[in-house]
Each structure stands twice: as C-alpha cells, then as structure tokens.
Image (cartoon, rainbow, N blue to C red):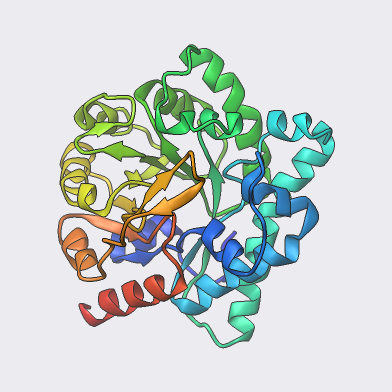
Amino acid sequence: MSSNASAPGLAGALAAGTVVLDGGLSNQLESAGHDLTDELWSARLLAERPEAITEAHLAYYLAGASVAITASYQATFEGFARRGIGRAEAGRLLALSVRLARDAARRARDAGVRRPLWVAASAGPYGAMLADGSEYRGRYGLTITELERFHRPRLEALAAAAPDVLALETVPDTDEAAALLRAVRGLGVPAWLSYTVDGPRTRAGQPLERAFALAADAEEIIAVGVNCCAPQDVTPAVELAARITGKPVVVYPNSGESWDAGARAWDGRTTFATEQVTAWRARGARLIGGCCRVGPEHIGSIARALGAAG
C-alpha cells in the first residue's frame, strides 16, 4: 500500500499529471561517507548499515521526490549467496529494502511533507548481479526462459513486501525485457520497464522501436522509458515510447558524466539541465527523476521546475 493511505495509486497519479522520482542512491550514500566498492554495491548496506539507506531516501523525499527507488538494484539471491548469505536471510534483506523506503516516507511526513509518497522496488538486470559491467552490454548467452527463472524469485520476494510499483530498470536488451515481462505476471504489483540506451538503440544494439513495443500490451506495465543514459538520449526516447506504447513514459538519466571503469571514477562534466524536464514532460514523460550522479539538489530543481510549469 502507499505510504499515505489516502493517496491514489501511482498509475492514477500518472494519468493526472507528472510525478517526480528520486536521484542516484549510490552517490547519495557515497556523499555520506559510505564505501560502495563492493560487488553488492549499495545492497551491502542493507545488511551492514540499513539506517544509512533510510537517510538517503529521506534526503530525496525532503528535496521534492514523490517516489523512492529501493536499494535492491544489485540485491539478488545469487549475489547474496556468494557472500555466504542464505536464501532466507536474502529474502529478508530484499523485503527490508522496501521497509526502509517506507520508513523514510513516514519520517518525511513527520517533517511536514504532505504530497503522496510512493515506493518503487528496484529490480536491476542480470548483469548487475555479475558485477562486471555486463548490464551495459546485455547478451549474456542465456535464453529468455533462463533469465525469467533468474528474475522471478526476486520479484516475488519484492512483491511480497508490498511496494507501490516494481522498477524493472537499466534493462540492456530485448531478451531480458521479454523475460522480465514474463516474470512480473501475476504478482499483483504494477511495474515500470526502463531501458538503458545508447542513442536510438538499447545497449545491446536493438532498435528502441522494437524494445518499447514489447511492453505495449503488457497490463502490468504502467510506464515505459529509459534510465542510466546520457541526458541527450532522453528526448527522442520519450517521443518514441509515448507513440509506440501509448503509456506514460518514465525517464531518469545520469548526470552526463562518463564512468571510467579502469580508474573506477567519473569523468567529464554534468550535462543534466533542469530546463530539459519540461520538454520531456511535453513529449509524454510522467515519471521524471535522475540516476547516477544526480543528487537531491537536482531533484529539488526538477520538482520546482515541474511545479512552476503547472
């Protein structure tokens, strides 16, 4: 259920207007001094410093976000097993990711936030579990059925924790999207599907027309779009997703900086400009936020820009 019992469902809110997403969870945690140089990334803090995750979510709610995306992007049964964490405890940690975001929403209400607040349970791609950068390539050599078998147990665990929506995010190719669309059926929780892209194609090189079309008739999917991409790739993707699917579009790009895998550092300059968000909304974007390196100050600017534009 929503963190505000009187709030409408997220799908209804999208039909009525624009909803602001949060920004990058990892950069907010790192700015608070937490080391995320680990295969589990932010998911490690679910076990070690859960209160830090709540604080990071709270910062985004207070900045103006209405949706917090949980710390479960890289949280999988397989990934936890490599760290000696058994299946029961892994399931508890997945559920905890939702509860921490709910806790942050309650604290935001206590601080005076009165708008509806929602929780999106993150389900990252198979490559995120591998922690080798393959989520930006796709094409893992697995069948759609094998990928569905990987994703379904985690989605079941997240759905059982009752988030408002499942965020099927940073999807690099159409095979994984097809697997996720199968895996999310019958869970009783709506979802959005968001690709990571390079220009007009998925990271695996498939045309976005084909990628978006997969979700056009999926009843569980309430929004389709892109994330973890360059800001300049957003506008054409929004137009395409809106035209092909007829659904609300979700967008949350990176700051525009580039990740140097060898140096394990970000390089370049920020190209994320708040002025872009009103253009994205005009073309069909209804869930708008940021991904890597987009912090609470950016989300606050987005919220103000969208509010000022009505």
From what the image shows, is residue 127 above or below residue 299?
Answer: above
Number of numbered labels in the structure image:
0
Question: Residue 24, position in %: x, y?
Answer: 48, 59
Residue in the image at 20% along x and 64% along y: 276
Left or right of 155: which side holds 238? Answer: left
Q: Is residue 3 visible?
A: no
Residue 113 or residue 57, whichever sits in front: 57
Q: Position of residue 115 (x, y in %)?
A: 46, 77
Q: At x 78% / y 51%, what residue is drawn? A: 47
- From the viewer's perspective, is residue 229 above or below residue 60? above
Residue occupying the far bottom of the picture: 112
Most foreground residue, 13 or 183? 183
Residue that protrudes farthest toward the front in the picture: 263
Observer-nearest residue: 262 or 14?
Answer: 262
Q: Quadrant of the N terminus?
A: bottom right
x%, y% of residue 125? 50, 33
Q: Position of residue 42 (x, y in %)?
A: 63, 51
Question: In this image, 82 relative to 257: left or right?
Answer: right
Q: Is residue 28 left or right of residue 36?
A: left
Image quadrant in which you'd find residue 126: top right
Task: Examine the rendered structure and indicate whether residue 209 appears above or below residue 120.
Answer: above
Residue at 53%, 20% (x, y): give it: 147
Can residue 137 be seen in this snapshot? yes
Quadrant placement of the C terminus: bottom left
Tell me the quarter of the picture where residue 205 sits.
top left
Choose between 70 and 291: the one closer to the eye: 291
Residue occupying image coordinates x 35% and y 58%: 255
